[in-house]
Amino acid sequence: MQARSEATAAWRLRDMAEADLDAVLTIAAGTDLAGLNRDGLRRELQLPFASCQVLAAADGVIGYSIHWVVAGEAEIHAVAVSAGIRRQGAGRLLVESVLERVGRAGATRCQLEVAEENAAGRALYTGLGFCEVGRRRDYYGSGRDSLLFECRIMGSKDSTLPNAEISITMHKSHSAF
């Protein structure tokens, strides 16, 4: 357990840069985000309402997130972590950082979708206060549905999701952005 906490303490969140694209595409290739491409990532980096982050360790990028904030609402487009790092808190750190950023940007809700068979992702999102609000049938191909999740950012006047409030707090591990 000690080695894990030392490793996670060395992780740093920062804005994604052009130089990170190869690593991000490699991580995406092992996920349902395999359709991501270099041109699409370059466009995301240029959009004024998009935010792209990477989680870096001493040996390089180990995860990334992409989200948008438009008209007071946020949507997480991608969260992915290198296969060898999964289930060690990297995904949670990325999503917590997104929630912190969207809260500071004034978003009152945050939405995302996740493959129904992605039990680890579903557990992560529900553990962070997201509620399942819908389904996209065959989104990932025949018989592979996507589940839609949403949470309300604490301080929002919206009460349609009473059990899904997110508190925006600063964590020491987020201090590197």
Image: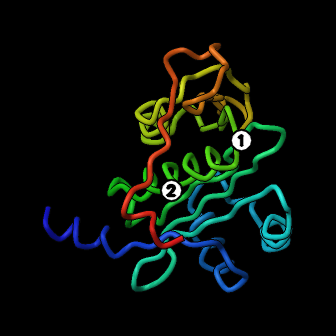
Q: In the displayed structure, would residue 44 be above or below residue 123?
A: below
Question: Which element type, helix, strand or loop, lies under badge 1?
Answer: strand
Q: CA distance from mark 2 to mark 1?
A: 15 Å
- For label 2, the residue is 94
Residue 14 or 145: which is nearer the viewer? 14
Residue 85 or 46: which is nearer the viewer? 46
Name the kind of residue labelled 1 in the image. Ala
**66 sits to left or right of 161:** right
User: Which residue sits furthest left?
Assistant: 2
**53 sits to left or right of 56:** right
Residue that appears at 45% across and 47% down: 169
Residue 7 or 140: which is nearer the viewer? 7
User: What is the basis of the colouring in this image?
Assistant: rainbow
Question: Which element type, helix, strand or loop, lies under badge 2?
Answer: helix
Quadrant of the drawing holding the N terminus? bottom left
Q: Residues within 10 Å of mark 1 (few under 14, many from 20)?
A: many
Q: Position of residue 13 (x, y in %)?
A: 50, 69
Q: Position of residue 16 (x, y in %)?
A: 65, 73
Q: Position of residue 76 (x, y in %)?
A: 67, 46
Q: In the displayed structure, would residue 3 be above or below residue 31?
A: below
Residue 160 or 95: which is nearer the viewer? 160
Q: Residue 18 occupies which quadrant of the picture?
A: bottom right
Among the two numbered marks 2 and 1 on one chain, the one whose residue lies closer to the N terminus: 1
Residue that appears at 50% across and 33% down: 166
Q: Position of residue 160 (x, y in %)?
A: 65, 13
**97 sits to left or right of 8:** right
Quadrant of the drawing holding the C terminus? bottom right
Q: Residues within 10 Å of mark 2 (few under 14, many from 20)?
A: many
Residue that appears at 71% across and 60% down: 51
Name the kind of residue labelled 2 in the image. Leu
- For label 1, the residue is 74
Residue that appears at 49% across and 17% down: 163
